Amino acid sequence: MTAPSHLLPRESPNYYPPSPSTAILFFVTSFALCIVYCKIKPLPVPKSLPGPTSYPLIGILKYMIDHWEDWPEECVRLSKKYGRTWGGGVPNVRGLNGMFLFVVDEKCVKHILYDNFDNYHKGPSFRSLFRDLLGNGIFVSDGAIWQEHRKITSNMFSRNLLRSTAEVTLSKLHQITALFHENNNTTIDLQDIFFRMTFDTTSYVAFGCEMNSLQALDKGQHHFAQAFDEMQMLITERIVDPLFEIKRFFQIGSRERRIAQLKHILYHESSAIINARRRSVQDGDCLGPDLLSRFLDHSKMVGQPLHDNELHSVVMNILLAGRDTTACALSWAFFEIIKRPDVIQKIVQEATQICGGKNGYTHDTVNQLQYTHAVVMEVLRLHPSVPNDYKFAIHDDVLPDGTFVPAGAGVIWLPRYMGRSEEIWGPDALEFKPERFLNQKEPSMFRYTVFNAGYRLCLGKPLALMTIKMTLAYLLPKFQFVDHLGHSGEYFWTIVSSMKGGLPVKVSKLSDEL
C-alpha cells in the first residue's frame, strides 16, 4: 500500500526547509505577541457582573465604540437593563485601564467620592487623555496639586464675587435684550447666545478681560471659543481609542494632528490673557479680584512663580467650568420652559414681585426666587451638563453593594441616569415637575450628582445657579420664545452635553422697554 503523496518526503528541488533564522524570528514574534496580549488583556471580570457583550482582548470596547455617539443615553438604557452596577473589561492600556464599572447606586457613589475618597483618583490615564486641553488643572489633578488649586479657587468664591458676577451678568443681559429688540420676530439660536454670554462673563470675572463675543454675532464664533469647542470634541474621541498615545506621539491621523494645531491656538490665546494680567501688575496696577490674579498673587506670596503652562491650565479649566456647563444648563432650561406656559407664568410672577421696581436684579434678590430655583434644579436633574464622570481605583476595593473593584479599574457614575431613575425620584421621574424641589431640603449630593459630590463638589455651584436664575427671571418677562421648529431634544455630547443643532427659537418682544 502506497502512502498518500502529501505524506511522502519532499524531494522537489523547489522545496526549502525553514532556515534557523526564520524559525527564531517566528518564535521571537510569537513570544512578543504573547507578552503584549498578557500585558493589555482586560482585567478579570467577576462572572456576577452584568454588562454588554464582551470579546477576547477588547472586552466591551467594541460595544462602546458602536454606541459612542449617544453613549450617555446608551448608559441610561444599560443601567435600566442591568441594574445599579454593571460593566466589563476593556484593553489594559493608558486611558482604559482594563475595566470599566458603571455605578448608579447612591451608597456606591458616596463610597467613591467621599468615604473612600483617597482610593479613587483621576490618575495618569485621565490626565493623559485630557492634558492637551486641561493641562494639570483642577479637573484632572490629584493630591497636593489639586488641593492647592482648590484652596486658591475656593478663596475667590465669596459673596463679593457673587455680587460682582451678578452685575456682570446683568450687563450681558442688557446686551442680549438690545440684540433681541433689533431682531424682533426673527429666529435666533439661544444656545449660541448663551455660550457667548457665559464666555464673555467668565472671561471678565475669571481673567479680567473683555471678549465681547455677544457684540460680534455677525462675525461668527470667537476663534478662542471655536478652538475650545473643537478640542473638546476631538479629545472625547480618545476615550475609546486604545492607541491614542501612540497616535499622539507619532502624529498619526488627522485627529491628533488637528489636536496639536488647536493646542497651539489655545495656548497662544491664553498666553495673551496671562501676559495682559502680568503687564498690569508691572505697570503698578493692583491685582484684581479675578481668579487669574489670585493665582498670580499666590505665586508671588509663596515666592514660586507659576510657569505659563500652569497658568494656561488655570485658564482652560475655568473656561470649561464657567462657560460650557452654565451655557448648556441655560439651553436645556429654555428648551423645557418654553413648552410650558404655566411654568413661564410662575417665573414671571415671581420675578416681577421680587425683582421688579426699585429692587432690581441683584445677587440678593435673585437668591429669593424660590420657584425659579426649583425650576433650575429640575432642569439640571433631567439634563446634567456633565452626563458621566469617572475616576480610577488605586487599590483593590469592594463597593457597598459587594462589587469587587480591582486596582486600576475605571469607576464611572452616571448623573444623567441618576436624575431619571424611578428608584431615586419615584414613578414620575421622567416628568418635568419643579414642585419636587419646593419647600424641601436640598437632595443628597450623592443622588443629585449634577455638581459632582464629596470633596470635589463644584465650587462654582452658587455662581452657576445665580446666573441661570437671573437669566430666566430677566428675559422671560420681556420676550416670548417659540420653538416653532420643534427641537427633538437630541443632545451633542463631548465633555459636556449641549443641544444638537443648537436651540433656534422665534423671539418676540412683549414690550418696547429695554
Image (cartoon, rainbow, N blue to C red):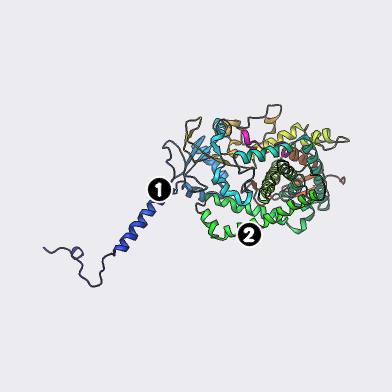
How far is disc 1 from disc 2 in space, using C-alphas? 36 Å
Drawn side of residue 452 relative to residue 185, left or right: left
Drawn side of residue 249 relative to residue 326, left or right: left
Drawn side of residue 10 relative to residue 54, left or right: left
- In this view, the residue in front, 19 or 362, is 19
Residue 49: x percent and y percent? 45, 37
Question: Residue 237 in magenta?
Answer: no
Question: Residue 457 in magenta?
Answer: yes
View extreme (front): residue = 303
Crowd tier of the residue under label 2, counting other residues whose Cα lies within 10 Å: few below 14, some 14–19, many 20 or above:
few
Look at mark 1 in the image and give the residue it sits on: 38
- In this view, the residue in front, 417 or 486, is 417
Report whether residue 459 is seen.
Answer: no
> Where 166 falls versus 272 (above or below)?
above
Q: Which residues are magenta?
A: 450-464
Please, what secondary structure does the residue beneath circle 1 have?
helix
Residue 477: x percent and y percent? 81, 40
Residue 337 position by quadrant = top right
Query: What residue is rendered at 80% in x and 37% in y?
Result: 163
Q: Counting residues from the N terminus, which is met first, the one under dot 1 or under dot 2?
A: 1
Look at mark 2 in the image and give the residue it sits on: 261
Query: What residue is rendered at 77% in x and 55% in y?
Result: 217
